[in-house]
Image (tube, grey):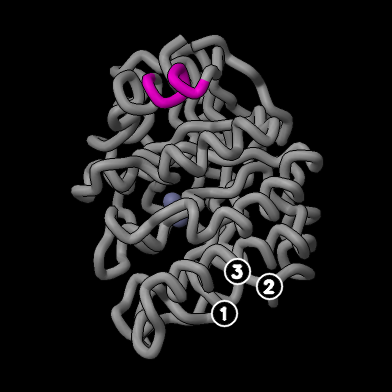
Amino acid sequence: MKICDFHVHSEYSDDSDAPLTAIIERAISLGIPKLCITDHYDIDFIPHEEDGMDFQLDTPAYLNALKKIRQDYSDKIDIRLGVELGLMNTVADKAKAYHNAYPEFDFIIGSSHLVHGMDPYYPEYYEGKTEKEALRNYFESILENVSLIDDYNVYGHLDYIVRYCPSRENAFKLTDHKDIFEAIFKIIIPKGKGIEINTGSLYKNMPYAHPHMDILRLYKEMGGEIITVGSDAHEPKYLCYSFETYARDALTSLGYKYFCTFKNQKPEFNLL
Ligand SMILES: [Zn+2]
Ligand SMILES: [Zn+2]
């Protein structure tokens, strides 16, 4: 099966103007049978500037629009209801309440966009620490989140920070952080939580998708079975970006025979 995109943003996200119809028409033209839109909702996000984006989501309006368009296109593509939930160690109760309030979601990506309220997108995050410490703090915050929060299905872009840190693709070495990833996977794998291959970095001039192949290999070695694939497209043109080249090669080389999609927050295993 063609690999289906399970990480896509629309105009319901603060940082996208993409109309739902344009995304869905693009997905149909690419020939994928299923698609999951996953707009941003970052609980307690702290905007960088006073009037900056806060990544809140009008969830009832968003779900109504998705349900309508799912019906309108039901004979052409299977649309799933998703959200990318921005997590921090301080939002566990709110994440649970949100999850309980909207049981109709098919798929919830848990993501780290902030580290204890600080945004690694901006240079200030790196001040006063070595780059290795900056990365480590980010990965440790994921470990904290997965220790406290279960209200997600896969953890998104595990090494998102490498996209923005000063030496980018050269900054990450698994040997510097292996203990943290082992601890993360020891928690999430038995709980039936997955991870994603996120190709969004590839059209941001990074040579590899999130996460680094060494992280994917460790996940596989530790028994991880659930991997979704997402483009993190904020514009329709990036849907399924490099899925049939990079993502398919990565999954195959790791020994996976399938990729995952989600329905009613349960994984589906689709043959590659
Ligand atoms: Zn994200
Ligand atoms: Zn995203």
The correct choice, above or below, for 176 with respect to 117 in the image is above
Image coords of residue 109 (percent x, y):
58, 47
Dividing the picture into quadrants, the one containing residue 103 is top right
Q: Please tell me the numbered disc located at residue 141.
A: 3
Q: Is 49 left or right of 264, judged from the image as shown?
A: left
Which secondary structure lies at badge 1? loop
Q: Earlier in the sequence, mark 1 or mark 3?
A: 1
The correct choice, above or below, for 133 with respect to 26 in the image is below
Q: Which residue is mark 1?
A: 116
Callout 1 touching callout 3 (CB < 8 Å): yes
Magenta region? 249-254
Q: Which residue is mark 2?
A: 89
Residue type, label 3: Ser
The correct choice, above or below, for 161 with respect to 224 in the image is below
Q: Earlier in the sequence, mark 2 or mark 3?
A: 2
Dividing the picture into quadrants, the one containing residue 149 is bottom right
Q: Residues within 10 Å of mark 2 (few under 14, many from 20)?
A: some
Nearer to the camera, 9 or 151: 151
The secondary structure that dominates the magenta segment is helix
